[in-house]
Image (cartoon, rainbow, N blue to C red):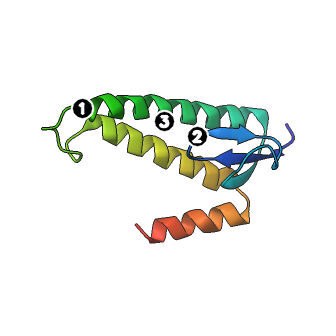
Amino acid sequence: MEKQPYYIEIENGEIQSQPDVSPWNFRVFANEKEIQSLRELFNKMNKADSDTFWRAHIPYRPYHIDPENDHYDQSMMSIYEKIYELGDDEARSHIKKMRNNV
């Protein structure tokens, strides 16, 4: 399968095949199977995000003792790992900088 460019917006989980459709953060080169895998990661992140919303209404439960937040954090890490794997040089460079700032 031939790889095509895709444009990724992290915040809302959009994956576009054209750069001028909406704002984007990262450009990746992927085949259909790889993009499907990235879509599944965004779906997991959205589910984890919903779970953290409901958990946020429990005031006595700290963030660091919260499996819902752990799932969300892991989902985000998986997305960035996939973008690093598929991304262009600029995407990889940006993610490396993010890792160094943690």
Q: Residue at x 60, y 66 (%)?
A: 94
- Which quarter of the figure is the C terminus placed in? bottom left
| Amino acid type, residue under disc 3 in the picture | Met
Image coordinates of residue 24 in percent, x first then y, are 69, 51
Mark 2 or mark 3: name the one nearer the start of the chain.
Answer: 2
Q: Quadrant of residue 63?
A: top left
Residue 15's quadrant in the figure?
A: top right
| 44 vs 63, nearest the viewer | 63
Badge 1 amino acid = His
Q: Which residue is mark 1?
A: 57
Left or right: where 91 falls relative to 12: right
Give residue 12's mark: 2
Q: Quadrant of the N terminus?
A: top right
Callout 3 secondary element? helix
Whether residues under marks 2 and 3 lie with C-beta atoms below 8 angstroms apart, the answer is: no
10 Å neighbourhood of mark 1: few (<14), some, or many (≥20)?
Answer: few
Q: Amino acid at mark 2?
A: Asn
